[in-house]
Structures are given as structure tokens and as C-alpha cells.
């Protein structure tokens, strides 16, 4: 593994923690399916700042251009996170008989699921 990928994974871990914690807090007030999306946006903002400053070398693009590209890559990842999280929470985990903390388990797996595709997208498209 490259140092860059390790830095990406660490930055992503911090962003994932922000995502998961905010989803947990939001779930007290709104439905899980909606909380996943809002928490993803919070995590994405954290990820952009960390990734831009600590992971990839500066590109020739303006910050707003990098931000727009970052959002596009993350919109693809959001679909993946939502499908995995909701699919696990609503169908797979209950089918397996896992009901204790099913939302947390499903959300953690969902947040982790796009690490490779996001890394490549940001390396080649956002900051490349």
C-alpha cells in the first residue's frame, strides 16, 4: 500500500467517524434513511478538507473546481453507501437474525464500502 492510500484511509476514517456520529445523533430526530444522507454530507465536508490538505498533492485547479469534482465522486459513493446501509439494515441483517445495533452495523459497513472506488476517483479526477 502506498503512503498516499494510507493517508487517504486515515483521513477517510476521521470523516467516517464524523459521518457515523452525526448519523447516530440525527437518528434521534429523523428517519434512518434520511439521516444516512445528511450524515454523509457532513462526513464529505470533513473528508474534503482533510483529503485536500493531507493526502493528495495540489492540483492546478481552483478550490471550487476541486470541490465540485469531489462532490461528483462522492455522489457516486453516496449511492453505494445508501444502498449498502439501507439494504443491510432493512433486509440482510434482519434476515440473518441480527437486530441488535443493526443500523449501526449497516451504516459502518456502508460507509467503508466505497474506499477503493473513492480513492481512485479522487486520485484521477478530483485532485489528479
Image: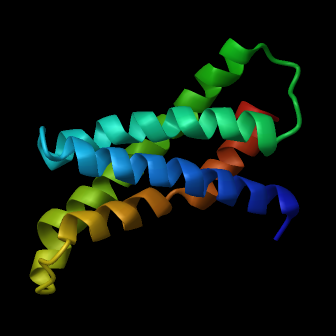
Closer to the camera in the image, 22 or 122: 22
Q: Residue 32: x, y in percent?
A: 17, 48
Q: Is residue 76 above or below residue 90?
A: above
Q: Is residue 51 above or below residue 82?
A: above
Q: Residue 99: x, y in percent?
A: 12, 77
**Occupied quadrant, residue 71:** top right
How many marks are shown on the rendered structure?
0
Q: Residue 12: x, y in percent?
A: 60, 52
Q: Is residue 95 above or below residue 118?
A: below
Looking at the image, what colour scheme do you see?
A: rainbow
Residue at (51% x, 37% y) in the render: 44
Closer to the camera in the image, 56 or 73: 56
Q: Is residue 79 left or right of residue 77?
A: left
Q: Quadrant of the N terminus?
A: bottom right
Residue at (19% x, 75% y) in the render: 92
Q: Residue 120: x, y in percent?
A: 70, 50
Closer to the camera in the image, 81 or 54: 54
Q: Is residue 65 above or below residue 95?
A: above
Q: Is residue 43 left or right of residue 36?
A: right
Q: Quadrant of the C terminus?
A: top right
Amino acid at each position: 500500500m502506498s503512503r498516499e492510500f494510507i493517508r487517504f484511509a486515515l483521513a477517510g476514517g476521521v470523516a467516517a467517524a464524523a459521518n457515523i456520529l452525526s448519523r447516530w445523533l440525527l437518528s434521534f430526530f429523523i428517519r434512518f434513511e434520511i439521516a444516512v444522507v445528511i450524515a454523509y454530507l457532513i462526513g464529505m465536508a470533513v473528508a474534503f478538507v482533510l483529503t485536500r490538505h493531507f493526502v493528495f498533492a495540489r492540483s492546478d485547479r481552483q478550490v471550487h473546481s476541486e470541490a465540485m469534482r469531489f462532490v461528483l465522486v462522492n455522489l457516486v459513493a453516496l449511492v453505494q453507501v445508501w444502498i449498502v446501509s439501507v439494504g443491510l439494515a432493512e433486509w440482510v441483517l434482519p434476515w440473518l437474525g441480527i437486530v441488535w445495533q443493526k443500523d449501526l452495523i449497516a451504516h459502518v459497513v456502508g460507509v467503508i464500502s466505497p474506499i477503493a472506488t473513492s480513492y481512485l476517483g479522487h486520485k484521477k479526477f478530483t485532485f489528479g
